[in-house]
Amino acid sequence: MPRSVHQLRTSRRDTVPVLVHEASAGPVVAITANIHGDEATGVAVVQELDRWLAERLLKGAVVLYPSLNPAGLSNRTRVLPPDGADLNRLFPGHRDGSESERHAASIWKDLAARRVGLVIDLHADSARSIP
């Protein structure tokens, strides 16, 4: 299966990693994780899916976004630094809005450009709740 890796540039200083697995023509599914920076479990799930899909995808495409909020992950904070916006409440975003709204708009535009028919967003307990 062809696999490609991209870095989605947003208005923020960071980039959003995008892993694309493509087989034959078919539906396109996106799986996102870490929309809240303190929900790290989804990052590991997407990494496992990346390995699993390399050998098993038969039709269509799966687009993996391991971390929609890399700055939040680095800072172990739920929200987008520096303005404290909750990315989960910003979609579809606004290209002329705040830095965080532009970040959301970049992700939304990427999903639309890839003709994604279904988005599965992985959530988890915050890192602070894990013993």
Image: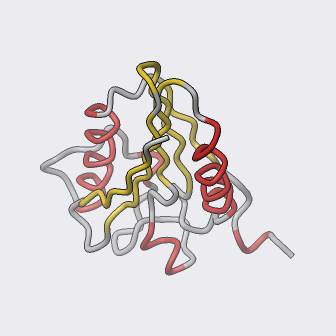
Instruction: Give me the residue at 33% from left, 47% from top.
Output: 107
**Residue 100 x, y percent position in the rendering:** 30, 59
Residue extending farthest to the right is 131
Quarter containing the C terminus: bottom right
Q: Is residue 113 above or below residue 88?
A: above
Give above or below for 31 relative to 81. Answer: above
- In the displayed structure, does residue 22 sit left or right of residue 56? left
Image check: 24 left or right of 55?
left
Instruction: Please name whichever residue, 32 or 58, is drawn nearer the observer in this view of the structure.
Output: 58
Front residue of 16/76: it is 16
Q: Tell me the residue at 41%/20% (across/down).
A: 25
| Looking at the image, residue 108 lies above or below residue 131 | above
26 vs 8, nearest the viewer: 26
Q: Position of residue 28 (x, y in %)?
A: 45, 27
Q: How is the image coloured?
A: secondary structure
Report x, y in % for residue 117.
44, 22
The residue at the far left in this view is 96
Q: Position of residue 58 (x, y in %)?
A: 57, 27
Taking the spot 37% from the left edge, 46% from the top edge, the residue there is: 90
How many numbered tags mark residues here?
0
Furthest-bottom residue in view?
75
Residue 77 quadrant: bottom right
Residue at 64% of width from left, 56% of height from top? 42
